[in-house]
Image: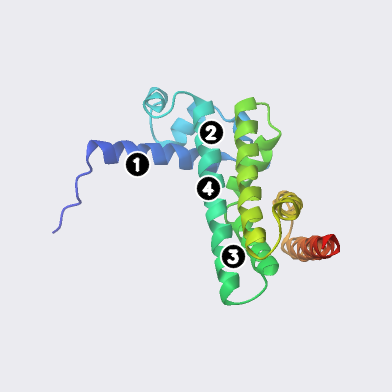
Amino acid sequence: MSKKPIKSRSQQKEATRRAIIDAAISELSDDTSFATLSLREVARKAGIAPNSFYRHFKDMEELGLTLVDESGLALRQLMRKARQRFKKNGSVIITSVKTFMEYTETNANILRLLFHERSGTTRALRTAVSREIQYFIVELTDYIQSIGYDNDVAYIQAEAMVAIIFSTGAESLAAKPAQRKQLELRAIKQLRLIATGARVTYLDKD
């Protein structure tokens, strides 16, 4: 009978840290924002004593900042993959919107964190979410530039597109399946209009 490998101290610490992060995310809902979570609730969900929390995070704000950073990174990586999928088959707008909507359905609490804290009461978290959104805009700007637009047109287009995507995601969290489909189709139409407008503007400029 094989024995389970013994975790090193650093592995145990990382596993507990991960449990705290996952616990905080799992406690979020339409009625519970990160700002209303208590340290005790998170510790209980993670299966640790409240005092043990401080071995991994200075306070709840630091945990919140970690959640925002991880959530933003995960979502950006997902959208990069969506653009790579487009290169093989299909429309970049359709592929990106469908990918984003699938993510909001399977990772609703991560999106709740970003949407709630974007206008939340904690300044540090608001700033962190704004920074993550800016990362999205910059990455999309780079992509749009790569298909032939100058920086100004690419940035304005990216900014408008990211605003629509996040607004659609926020609406989708409380939507029923049929409503989600309508939101998805609406977002695709809106993004196509922006792309068409940017193309016309760019051509007129020439």
Indicate which label's residue lies in the foreground, 3 or 4. 3
Dot 3 or dot 2: first in sequence order is 2
Indicate which label's residue lies in the foreground, 3 or 1. 3
- Label 2 SS: helix
Residue to which mark 3 is pinned:
83
Dot 3 or dot 1: first in sequence order is 1
How far, Cα to Cα, is label 3 from label 4? 16 Å
Q: Quadrant of residue 28?
A: top right
Rendering coords of residue 173 (x, y %): 69, 51
Mark identifier at residue 65: 2
Residue to which mark 4 is pinned:
73
Indicate which label's residue lies in the foreground, 3 or 2. 3
Residue to which mark 1 is pinned:
15
Inspect this view and state whether residue 171 appears.
yes
Indicate which label's residue lies in the foreground, 2 or 1. 2
State whether residue 35 is above or below residue 73: above
Amino acid at the residue labelled 1: Ala
Rendering coords of residue 199 (x, y %): 79, 65
How far, Cα to Cα, is label 4 from label 1? 20 Å
